Amino acid sequence: MDAMNEYQNSPSVAIDGEVIRRIREDSRLTQLYVAKVVGVTTDTVSRWENNRYPTIRRDNALKLAEALEVDLADILKQDPGGSPSSVADPVPLPGNSLTGRKRYAFILGALVVVLVLLAIFWLYQQQGVPLHLQAVRILPPYAAPGSKILLQVDVEAEQPLKMILKEKLPAGWRFVDAKPKASNVDEKNGLVRWIFKTPLQQAKIFYLLDVADTVRVGEHIEVSGELVANTATGPYTVAIPSSGTLTVAPLHWADRNGNSVIDDMEILAVSDLSAETGDALVNWNLIEDLWEAGGYRWDQQERRFVPVPRPPEQPAQQ
């Protein structure tokens, strides 16, 4: 097969950008006109003329020759023997054009994101981190020195897990009771632990504490703890944050707004807790007495809340 037949059958051809520009300018044709005839953008025509794409598809080359009103051979790059050059389909490099660089940057960025996600997933697998495991401690707003207060811890996991819950009590405070029952109470170090041998996804833990006599009114109390879960690759520990602020004041823990009154909404909230914990843990009888009386006060000497009857309503004046 001679050189002419070879370039005629080749899927790609090598074009001469300088010749294409000269023919277009001599014919007083615009790049826009040529681009519309060929079916490409003016940016592509410019790159052809600047030899940014030294080879193009043969069908595009035929359209280009038609737009310039010349033979195909007239716009092909000539080899040293004077015959049109033919090559295989070119593979554009990312740096050949702005569009190519953007495409390359996009692909590279996507690969980086995928690698980062794979690395994070691998770390989760290595550390045994469940995709969702959390716990939160719900603190009452107030605690009177020497009184008893009820705390709550809510646990949630994406899948059933065996867990250990640990709560570190403030110095001088004493554990009284809990539901479910605590597995271990270390009074010396102020540590209470619950072991859940059966895998669970959700749990509510309630526990009653004796507030230390030594706490000062106005002091904010911190309670800390952690949750240890048995995952597929080993134990994983999360700290337990507290919801709300616990302040030392001569107020009952159920008195959410601190006005020395257990109102209707507050006793309904205690009723909900009582249904989950039992009357004894919340001391329902006392709270009901405070609610019925209409008010209360804290007797520090006797370390108890005393009902204060609501003053009788005065008849309206005529």
Image (cartoon, rainbow, N blue to C red):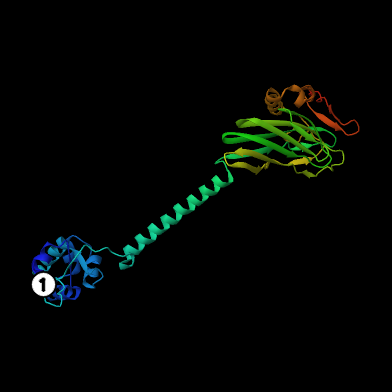
* Depth check, front residue: 236 or 232: 232
> Hey, which quadrant is residue 137 in on the image?
top right
Where 278 falls versus 5 (above or below)? above
> Hey, which quadrant is residue 86 in on the image?
bottom left
| 98 left or right, relative to 41 | right
Which residue occupies the extreme front position in the image?
1
Q: Dot 1 lies on which element?
A: helix
| 211 left or right, relative to 23 | right
Q: Number of marks in the image?
A: 1
| 17 left or right, relative to 94 | left
Question: Is residue 109 something that shows in the picture?
Answer: yes
Provide the residue designation for mark 1.
74
Where residue 65 appears, x then y in whole percent? Answer: 12, 67
Which residue occupies the extreme right position in the image?
301
* Quarter the N terminus occupies: bottom left
| Kind of residue at badge 1 | Asp
Question: Which residue is depicted at the point 68% across and 22% down?
Answer: 275
Question: Is residue 253 something that shows in the picture?
Answer: no
Question: Which residue is depicted at the point 82% across and 38% down?
Answer: 173
Where residue 77 appears, x then y in whole percent? Answer: 16, 73
* Depth check, front residue: 85 or 114: 85
Question: Which residue is depicted at the point 33% across and 66% down?
Answer: 98
* Depth check, front residue: 153 or 109: 109
* Quarter the C terminus occupies: top right
Question: Which residue is depicted at the point 48% across and 50% down?
Answer: 118
Q: How crowded is mark 1: few (under 14 residues within 10 Å), some or many (20 or more)?
A: some
* Depth check, front residue: 216 or 93: 93
Where residue 156 appears, x then y in whole percent? Answer: 60, 35
